[in-house]
Image (cartoon, helix red, strand yellow):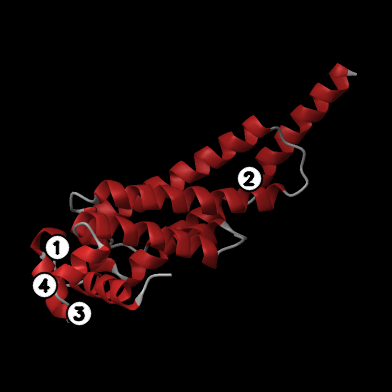
Amino acid sequence: MANLTERAIKASVLKLLNEKPVNQITIKDIVEDCGINRNSFYYHFRDLPSLIEEMVLEQAELIIEQFPSINSLEECIDAAVSFAMSNRKAVMHIYNSVSRDVYEQYLWRVCEYTVTKYIDGVLGDTKINEFDREVLIDFYKCACFGKILDWQREGMKSDLKERFIRLCELKKGVIEEIAAKCAATENDKEKKGQ
């Protein structure tokens, strides 16, 4: 658990990210905002990019903790974009900065986690081989990741949740149908092997 000074620094950085781009935030801005001196900042963090990276990775872990299970694809997208929706400017500033790769790693991790939880929940006790399971997860993870990046590239202007919910309505039952096909293939393999 971060100490009080680290939390204050992170809160200041998030506040400043919601006000201006990363390249316009200085250590002086941060320490003045949270009322500490430069040495205190450097005692806790090497520099602003490493601080942003730590904050982004912590956010990914927090989302994973908040969603121990995922019951729908809509919930996947909610989990993946919850932080972005409540911190639009900050996320866009990170997305449009040299720290974009850190944000994309965060997004990839959250998409992978949420989609894996959802797919495993849908599959339940369905007999499916590991390769097919991984293919399903890869497909939906890439779709989720790609849609969110596309939304951010467009400036987060459209209602991503509305679009994703509609897509989920159109694709309802597809995962279950694929799982049934995979299970039938596995059953056929077992019968032929006997």
Could you say where residue 62 lies in the image, as x and y percent from the top left?
46, 65
Amino acid at the residue labelled 3: Cys
Q: Where's residue 98, x and y in %?
A: 18, 49
Say which quarter of the image contains residue 136.
top right
Give the residue type that dot 1 points to. Answer: Pro
Residue at the image point whose x is 76% and y is 43% from the top? 126
Q: Amino acid at mark 2?
A: Ile
Q: Determine which of the numbered discs, if any, sits on residue 124 in the image.
A: none
Please say if the residues under marks 2 and 1 sit with CB atoms less than 8 Å apart.
Answer: no
**10 Å crowding of disc 4: few (<14), some (14-19), many (20+):** some
- Horizontally, is 82 left or right of 69 in the view? left
Question: Relative to residue 102, is residue 117 drawn left or right?
Answer: right
Residue denoted by label 1? 21
Per the image, label 4 sits on a secondary structure element best described as helix
Q: What residue is pinned by disc 3?
A: 34
Disc 3 and disc 4: Cα gap in Å?
9 Å
Q: Is residue 38 above or below residue 123?
A: below
> Disc 2 marks which residue?
175
Counting residues from the start of the chain, the first of labels 1 and 4 encountered is 1
Pointer 4: what residue? 29
Foreground of the two, 161 or 131: 131
Q: Secondary structure at mark 2?
A: helix
Query: How many residues crowd mark 3 within 10 Å: few (<14), some (14–19), many (20+)?
Result: some
Q: Amino acid at mark 4?
A: Asp
Mark 2: give few (<14), some (14-19) or many (20+) Cα within 10 Å: some
Task: Determine whether 193 is above or below 28 in the image.
Answer: above
* Placement of 89 over or under 155, stated as above or below: below
Q: Earlier in the sequence, mark 3 or mark 2?
A: 3
**Mark 2 vs mark 4, CA separation in Å:** 49 Å
**Quick one: SS at disc 1?**
loop
